[in-house]
Image (spheres, rainbow, N blue to C red):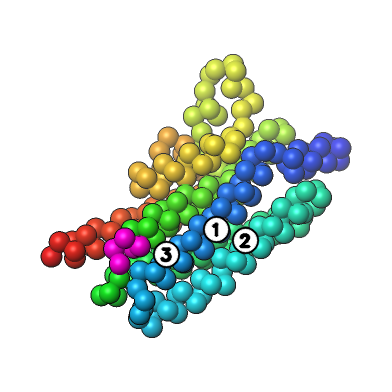
């Protein structure tokens, strides 16, 4: 029993899906830094509230990028405990940075001197960051369960993919990969709700509601700004 658990741990640390998700979180941190830079260019004389949100974001993004590097190190040396700790910390910081950028983006609507081009760029970056962060979020709350199911445990996953209930013999023992989580995140952000993969556990459902709320907030913000420009 111990040998089996050890084998699963080593497989997890060497899994291409795991490293794809870690890299995605690193990309999310870079997108967040780019968003902060773009937001700073929307208005050379921002309001006090916008300035406060920018100051908060100055710390969240670099720290998230740093913890991603630390998590990668512990992944390389196969320290599962410390990898999980720093991965979770990175995910929390990434969510905070994403929400901070969203609020900063919305606050820019009240700055009369903002530049529409940079505002559109900032909104696009927040959209991409939303996809990257929640791809990691869905992996975090589903992949460990999928691994346990693959090891023979009688539990249900966080997300049921079409492959899980397919009768194709070639899909027997199928386990979601990196692209499956990225695809789910992209569809959730683009269609404002879950598509064919079905969320079964509360953390996934809450995550989807939050992701859709962020995507809708960006859309409403752009619509409001467009109406303001027309008027």
Q: Position of residue 166 (x, y in %)?
A: 52, 23
Q: Residue at 46% across / 66% down in the picture?
A: 37
Q: Is residue 96 left or right of residue 212?
A: right
* Mark 2 vs 3, N-terminal side: 3
> Which residue bears the numbered disc 2?
65
Q: Is residue 48 above or below residue 64?
A: below
Q: Which residue is mark 1?
A: 30
Q: CA distance from mark 3 to mark 1?
A: 12 Å
Q: Nearer the viewer, residue 46 or 217?
A: 46
Q: Residues within 10 Å of mark 3 (few under 14, many from 20)?
A: some
The structure residue drawn at horizontal position 25% and vertical position 75%, both measured from the top left corner, is 112
Q: Which residues are magenta?
A: 115-119
Q: How many marks?
A: 3
Q: Tell me residue 123's x, y (percent).
A: 37, 58
Tell me whether the residue at label 1 lies in contact with that at label 2, contact meaning CB atoms closer than 8 angstroms.
Answer: yes
Which quadrant does the C terminus fall into? bottom left
Give the alpha-carbon distance from disc 2 to disc 3, as whole Å: 18 Å
* Image point (51%, 71%), residue name: 57
The residue singled out by tag 3 in the image is 38
Left or right relative to 116: residue 20: right
Q: CA distance from mark 1 to mark 2?
A: 7 Å
- Residue 60 found in image quarter: bottom right
For marks 3 and 1 on the same chain, the one whose residue lies earlier in the sequence:
1
Q: Residue furthest left?
A: 231
Q: Is residue 21 above or below residue 53?
A: above
Q: Quadrant of the N terminus?
A: top right
Classify mark 1: helix, strand or loop: helix
Where residue 201 is drawn, which disc sits there? none
């Amino acid at each position: 029993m111990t040998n089996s658990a050890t084998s699963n741990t080593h497989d997890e640390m060497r899994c291409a899906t795991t490293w794809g998700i870690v890299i995605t979180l690193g990309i999310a941190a870079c997108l967040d830094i780019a968003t902060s830079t773009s937001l700073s260019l929307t208005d050379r004389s921002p309001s006090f509230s916008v300035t406060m949100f920018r100051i908060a974001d100055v710390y969240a993004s670099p720290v998230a990028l740093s913890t991603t590097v630390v998590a990668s190190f512990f992944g390389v040396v196969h320290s599962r405990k410390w990898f999980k700790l720093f991965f979770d910390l990175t995910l929390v910081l990434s969510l905070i940075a994403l929400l901070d950028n969203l609020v900063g983006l919305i606050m820019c609507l009240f700055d009369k001197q903002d530049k529409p081009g940079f505002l559109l760029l900032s909104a696009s970056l927040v959209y991409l960051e939303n996809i990257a962060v929640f791809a990691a979020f869905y992996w975090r709350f589903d992949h460990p369960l999928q691994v346990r199911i693959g090891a023979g445990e009688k539990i249900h996953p966080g997300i049921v993919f079409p492959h899980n209930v397919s009768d194709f013999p070639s899909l027997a023992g199928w386990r979601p990969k990196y692209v499956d989580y990225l695809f789910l995140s992209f569809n959730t952000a683009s269609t404002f709700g879950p598509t064919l993969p079905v969320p079964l556990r509360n953390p996934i459902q809450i995550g989807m509601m939050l992701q859709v709320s962020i995507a809708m907030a960006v859309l409403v913000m752009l619509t409001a700004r467009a109406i303001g420009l027309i008027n």
